Image: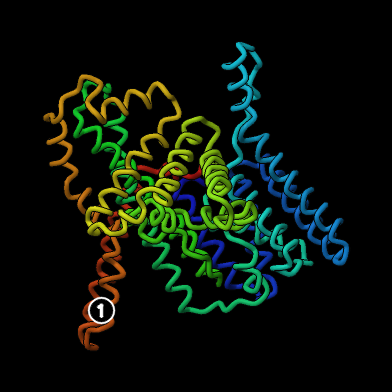
């Protein structure tokens, strides 16, 4: 798809910004809407109908909720209609073939799968439209009376394809009145560039090593190499997905919007609970507010609390894709979170931070092995390689070769996965004026050099899809 290419965004974004800043304030939403629809339709002109349909459904139900504001039965009916239509649309396009293939495997039937292509970003914009309807029913937001303003919210291209999931309450005020200033543009540009550097310089290159290791036969890769590959995929996924979030947040700032953070150095976590407070924050808070708490949260009996946790994590896994490995991955975290809550959580909190961090990162890296293989045979083979059960040796020459050739890259990736940048920013604030000037100058030189290096990589590799586009 054309819009999954970073170079396409390089040409698209400047054109949008030029027109966006050139037109009067009242026309800015319409320019943003037009470019957002073009952005989505460029790659999948057919599936844009789904997004328009979902937007129309929730906008109409919202107006009807307002119309019957004192009739709770009707308001609940419109909410249910919205949820059913959105989930039916998501379920049909994302899970129909999964259901068919599962039925065939269980019953021996030969039902022909539909072979539907997955509309890009459907999981994200469906959850956004649903959050608007739910919040409106709860009277936590006011109804949006302008359909084009609402459609601008749903289709906003910076975060349309792979998040973060932006709730209407977050941008409602700014959809109508926002400050578009030079300072925001500069901050947004720098944040966008940070994401671009993370994607091109780190995620793509670490991912190349992961793909090389993944292609090896399970028995030919040493245990150390298998773990190195798992660590590489973890780093690739983190830098790839957080890079998209950085770019989306940066583009939002250029346009005058303040999207919430989606990552907070998750690989710095000291427990599984801590990891999920830091990873894909917009998704975990969505399930917390719209599934976990309505089910009763943790203010129920132990049995019901465990039920609530497993429902949420089953759905979290399934949200990521129509394959059993995603369900297994979700339940894997459900079990671990339950154990942290009721078995070893207090003992864990008393351990030294390095031990807690090692515990958390081992669980995360192992979990992403489950996440990446949708073929159970391949998953079993790689898990065997991780623990030496595939007849593979503990160390091998290939591990030393990979560690030697990718050592600097991996060290930089690990360093940047920790909150080094915020630490240095805080240190810079305490410097005298002359010291801050020098740091700012060095920072700008660093941005220029990183940009030149990124451009060189993009010239050689024009196709740079983000991993989360397929979810």
| Residue topped by disc 1 | 428
Location of residue 141 in the rendering, given as x and y in whole percent from the top left corner: 70, 68
Rendered view: 194 above or below 341: below
- Residue 445: quarter of image: bottom left
Residue beneath the point at 63% across and 22% down: 100
Residue beneath the point at 21% across and 33% down: 225
Residue beneath the point at 50% across and 69% down: 253
Location of residue 6 in the rendering, given as x and y in whole percent from the top left corner: 44, 50
Left or right of 302 on screen, residue 126? right
Q: How is the image coloured?
A: rainbow
Left or right of 154 on screen, residue 307? left
Location of residue 298 in the rendering, given as x and y in whole percent from the top left corner: 54, 55
Most extreme residue toward the front is 301
Location of residue 177 in the rendering, given as x and y in whole percent from the top left corner: 65, 77
Rendered view: 86 above or below 450: above
Q: Is residue 8 visible?
A: yes
SS state under label 1: helix
């Amino acid at each position: 798809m054309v819009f999954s290419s970073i170079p396409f965004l390089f040409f698209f974004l400047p054109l949008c910004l030029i027109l966006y800043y050139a037109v009067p304030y009242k026309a800015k939403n319409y320019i943003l809407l037009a470019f957002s629809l073009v952005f989505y339709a460029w790659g999948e002109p057919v599936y844009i109908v789904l997004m328009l349909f979902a937007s129309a459904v929730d906008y109409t139900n919202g107006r009807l909720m307002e119309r019957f504001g004192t009739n709770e039965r009707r308001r609940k009916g419109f909410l249910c209609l919205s949820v059913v239509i959105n989930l039916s649309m998501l379920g049909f396009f994302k899970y129909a073939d999964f259901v068919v293939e599962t039925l065939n495997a269980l019953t021996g039937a030969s039902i022909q799968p539909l072979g539907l292509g997955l509309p890009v970003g459907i999981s994200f914009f469906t959850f956004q439209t649903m959050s608007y309807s739910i919040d409106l029913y709860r009277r936590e937001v006011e109804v949006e009376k302008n359909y084009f303003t609402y459609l601008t919210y749903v289709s906003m291209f910076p975060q349309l394809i792979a998040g973060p999931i932006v709730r209407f309450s977050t941008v409602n005020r700014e959809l109508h009145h926002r400050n578009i200033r030079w300072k925001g543009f500069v901050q947004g540009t720098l944040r966008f560039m940070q994401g671009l550097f993370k994607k091109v310089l780190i995620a793509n290159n670490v991912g190349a090593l992961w793909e090389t290791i993944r292609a090896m036969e399970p028995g030919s890769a040493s245990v150390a190499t298998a773990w190195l590959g798992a660590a590489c995929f973890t780093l690739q996924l983190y830098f790839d997905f957080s890079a998209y979030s950085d770019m989306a947040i940066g583009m939002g700032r250029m346009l005058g919007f303040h999207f919430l953070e989606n990552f907070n150095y998750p690989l710095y976590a000291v427990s599984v609970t801590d990891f999920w407070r830091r990873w894909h924050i917009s998704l975990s808070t969505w399930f917390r507010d719209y599934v976990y708490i309505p089910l009763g949260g943790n203010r129920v009996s132990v049995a019901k609390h465990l039920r609530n946790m497993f429902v949420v994590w089953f759905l979290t896994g399934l949200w990521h894709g129509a394959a059993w490995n995603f369900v297994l991955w979700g339940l894997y975290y459900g079990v671990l979170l339950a154990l942290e809550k009721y078995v070893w959580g207090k003992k864990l909190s008393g351990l030294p931070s390095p031990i807690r961090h090692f515990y958390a990162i081992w669980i995360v890296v192992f979990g992403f092995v489950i996440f990446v293989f949708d073929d159970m045979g391949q998953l079993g083979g790689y898990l065997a390689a991780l623990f030496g059960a595939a007849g593979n040796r503990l160390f091998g020459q290939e591990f030393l070769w990979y560690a030697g050739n990718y050592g600097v890259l991996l060290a930089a990736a690990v360093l940047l996965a920790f909150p080094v940048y915020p630490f240095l920013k805080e240190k810079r604030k305490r410097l005298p004026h002359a010291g801050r000037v020098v740091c700012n100058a060095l920072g700008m030189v660093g941005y220029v050099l990183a940009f030149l290096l990124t451009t060189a990589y993009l010239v050689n590799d024009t196709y740079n899809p983000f991993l989360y586009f397929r979810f």
